[in-house]
């Protein structure tokens, strides 16, 4: 398989990265691969490496059973093919699992049950040896093996698959950033917390908030806060503010450094937001079931805390903070 034969699909991959919505891109990309290599299923994702093998952090299933992910975690310590991929990054291994694994073993039962009889497995190099991105392509019929032509084609295409996915995520983040205020950094997050994409400013904010944590993952307490309910809940940290928005199945996360306005209580914030909407002291008092004197006192307290002298300055501070 010479690269010239694959040029049309490579060009189509990058065209799709620009034209296909991010939520649909991986499906579209694998359908392009199918025009050169037949497959019955695929797992495409990112994993961490520990003493038990590979642990999927973020994975896309294409015509493959997502339930297999939890089952795989029970047998991943037996996966010699994954170990091969870790030690041969950038190469594609051609595995006939029907003979590679003992059918009576747990991993052999897993590959049989999920119809992974034949597999082309590719792990990619990473700046962090504890992480690996991979694409695993399967055929369910034990007799329907992959050829050397198939293997070489996939070995050529997988780096382009991942690069085109990065382009798709970058473009989606750029479009999302265009609708946000300048002070917000942007990332794209998997539903479980791993970051699929993050701009450098976002990574710096996360590193400052959790110096000993993993930059490529939102920690549990913050993840739970921003994914609560409809995904619009805010996480207020020691050094940052983080919010999430879900659009077309994609979770976008915004983060910025904490500002003085972030220290307002919920009642104070409600008063200031009412001022921003043009309500008078008396109208705010009725709206929030407070006395006019209490409203005036709270406004003066907020003025003093934020170092402003007028309500116009107060509203400007509020808008800069994104409230």
Image (spheres, rainbow, N blue to C red):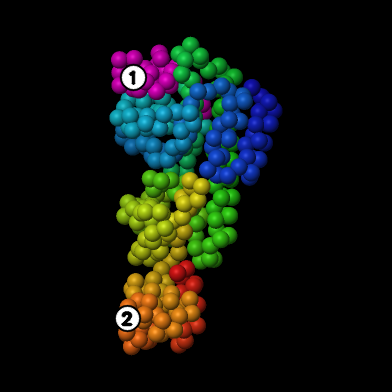
Residue 107: horizontal and vertical position, in percent? 34, 22
Q: Is residue 46 visible?
A: yes
Vertical arrangement, residue 137 with respect to residue 317, above or below? above
Q: From the image, tell me which residue sits under label 1.
A: 109
Q: Quadrant of the C terminus?
A: bottom left
Comparing labels 2 and 1, the label whose residue is closer to the camera: 2
Residue 307: horizontal and vertical position, in percent? 42, 84
The quarter of the displayed image where residue 24 is located: top right
Does residue 304 appear to the left or right of 145 in the view shown? left
Residue at mark 2 to residue at mark 1: CA–CA distance: 67 Å
* Residue 290: assigned label: 2
Nearest the eye: 127 or 240? 240
- Magenta run includes residue 2: no
Residue 73: horizontal and vertical position, in percent? 32, 32
Nearest the eye: 237 or 86? 237
Question: Which portion, as a residue range, is magenta?
Answer: 91-117
Q: Quadrant of the N terminus?
A: top right
The quarter of the displayed image where residue 221 is located: bottom left
Say what secondary structure mark 2 lies in: loop
């Amino acid at each position: 398989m010479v690269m010239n034969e694959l040029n049309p699909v490579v060009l189509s991959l990058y065209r799709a990265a620009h034209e296909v919505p991010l939520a649909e891109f991986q499906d579209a990309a694998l359908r392009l691969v199918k025009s050169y290599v037949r497959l019955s299923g695929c797992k495409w994702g990112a994993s961490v490496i520990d003493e038990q093998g590979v642990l999927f952090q973020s994975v896309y299933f294409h015509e493959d059973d997502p339930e297999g992910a939890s089952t795989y975690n029970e047998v991943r310590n037996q996966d010699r093919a994954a170990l091969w991929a870790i030690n041969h990054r950038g190469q594609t291994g051609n595995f006939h699992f029907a003979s590679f694994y003992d059918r009576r073993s747990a991993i052999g039962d897993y590959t049989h049950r999920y119809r992974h009889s034949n597999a082309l497995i590719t792990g990619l190099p990473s700046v962090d040896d504890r992480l690996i991105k991979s694409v695993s392509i399967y055929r369910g019929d034990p007799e329907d093996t992959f050829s050397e032509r198939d293997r070489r084609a996939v070995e050529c295409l997988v780096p382009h698959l991942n690069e085109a996915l990065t382009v798709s995520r970058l473009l989606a983040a750029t479009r999302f950033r265009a609708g946000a205020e300048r002070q917000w950094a942007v990332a794209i997050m998997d539903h479980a917390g791993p970051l699929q994409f993050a701009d450098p400013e976002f990574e710096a904010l996360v590193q400052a908030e959790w110096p000993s944590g993993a930059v490529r993952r939102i920690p549990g307490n913050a993840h739970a806060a921003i994914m609560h309910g409809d995904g619009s809940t805010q996480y207020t940290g020691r050094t940052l503010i983080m919010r999430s928005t879900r659009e077309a199945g994609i979770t976008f996360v915004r983060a910025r450094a904490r500002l003085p306005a972030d220290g307002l209580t919920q009642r104070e914030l409600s008063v200031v937001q009412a001022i921003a909407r043009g309500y008078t002291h008396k109208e705010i008092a009725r709206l929030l079931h407070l006395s006019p004197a209490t409203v005036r006192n709270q406004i003066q307290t907020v003025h003093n805390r934020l170092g402003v002298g007028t309500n116009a300055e107060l509203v400007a501070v509020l808008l800069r903070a994104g409230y």
